[in-house]
Image: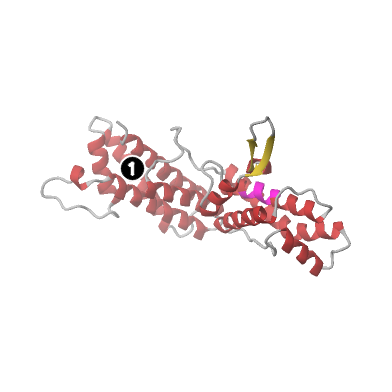
């Protein structure tokens, strides 16, 4: 993703095009990750955009955002940094407060001094976001073969988004335990979504609790895939659930183990979604 991707083009009916900041995208980024681009990549592009805009404003003009648009951009950037646990230290809200900031810092007579002030603020952010991008590229979680970016099951998609976020920022064994915890939550979200007592409960049975994921998903697979392949699918589901529990409770899980658990539960979610298709 590039800084220019935060703009859209509009045509006035006379063949003239205007480039405008995509405020809808920024608003969406405040409440959650982009549908297809990882937070680290979006955040890196947005950080460069606002850094460049402040540099232009502090060195003779040439910026094309106004104060309101910059406030929206910084709010979105802060939300992304919060999701990634990246330190956000921008001490101004817009161009007006940036000018007041550089005056307080004694940079009124030097463009270079203003560039240096901005570098002190944004360079650590750039470095951290770029490191997270590299980490993500080096260990990207599985994506389904389906063209649909989401399952369409709200609780499941929420946990999938959280799993990707947790894995992206994880760096310690405790973080990898947290990845295992989200994997377990994802299996429970699947259990709560696909198991329907009206369809899957047999006469004389009591409905198992949502946390009994193996029992509930076993029955869902049994009823959704009555052919000879059901035993293999049930073993696959149980293995994914057991490995997620292993990573959640492990004393010192590695990034590789956390990634395997995450991949397994992500693919389980998409397998179960495929079983729901006609």
Task: Kindly report the secondary structure that dominates the magenta region of the rendered protein.
Answer: helix
Which residue, as the protein is rendered here, is positioned at the far bottom? 104
What SS does tag 1 mark? helix
Residue at 22% x, 53% y is 208
- Measured as percent of width and height from the top left, residue 26 is found at 58, 49
For label 1, count other residues whose C-alpha is less than 10 Å away and answer few (under 14), some (14-19) or many (20+).
many
- What quarter of the picture does the C terminus occupy? top left
Image quarter in which the N terminus is found: top right
Q: Residue at x 55, y 51 (%)?
A: 27
Quadrant of the rendered image containing residue 235: top left
Quarter location, residue 94: bottom right
Q: Position of residue 49 (x, y in %)?
A: 70, 48
Q: Would you say 54 lies left or right of 184 here?
A: right
Residue farthest toward the right in the current orientation of the protein: 109
**Left or right relative to 60: residue 251:** left
Q: Nearer the viewer, residue 197 or 26?
A: 26
Q: Read off the residue under disc 1.
A: 237
Segment tinted magenta in the rendering:
43-49
Q: Is residue 13 magenta?
A: no
């Amino acid at each position: 993703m590039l800084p220019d991707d935060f703009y859209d083009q509009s045509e006035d009916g006379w063949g003239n095009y205007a480039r405008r900041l995509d405020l809808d995208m920024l608003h969406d980024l405040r409440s959650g990750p982009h549908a297809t681009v990882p937070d680290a990549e979006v955040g890196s592009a947005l950080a460069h955009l606002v850094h460049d805009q402040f540099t232009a404003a502090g060195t003779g003009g040439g910026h094309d955002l106004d104060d309101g648009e910059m406030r929206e951009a910084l709010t979105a950037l802060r939300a992304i940094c919060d999701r990634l646990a990246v330190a956000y230290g921008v001490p101004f809200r817009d161009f007006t407060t940036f000018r007041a900031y550089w005056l307080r810092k004694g940079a009124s007579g030097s463009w270079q001094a203003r560039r240096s002030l901005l570098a002190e603020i944004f360079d650590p952010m750039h470095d951290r976001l770029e490191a997270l991008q590299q980490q993500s590229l080096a260990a990207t979680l599985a994506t389904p073969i389906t063209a649909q970016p989401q399952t369409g099951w709200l609780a499941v998609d929420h946990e999938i988004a959280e799993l990707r976020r947790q894995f992206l920022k994880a760096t310690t064994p405790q973080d990898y335990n947290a990845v295992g915890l989200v994997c377990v939550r994802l299996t429970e979200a699947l259990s709560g979504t696909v198991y329907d007592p009206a369809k899957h409960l047999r006469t004389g049975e009591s409905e198992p609790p949502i946390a009994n994921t193996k029992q509930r998903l076993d029955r869902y697979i049994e009823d959704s895939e009555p052919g000879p392949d059901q035993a293999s699918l049930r073993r696959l589901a149980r293995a994914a659930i057991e490995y997620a529990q292993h990573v959640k409770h492990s004393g010192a899980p590695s990034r590789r183990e956390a990634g395997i658990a995450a991949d397994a539960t992500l693919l389980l979610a998409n397998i179960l979604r495929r079983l729901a298709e006609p």
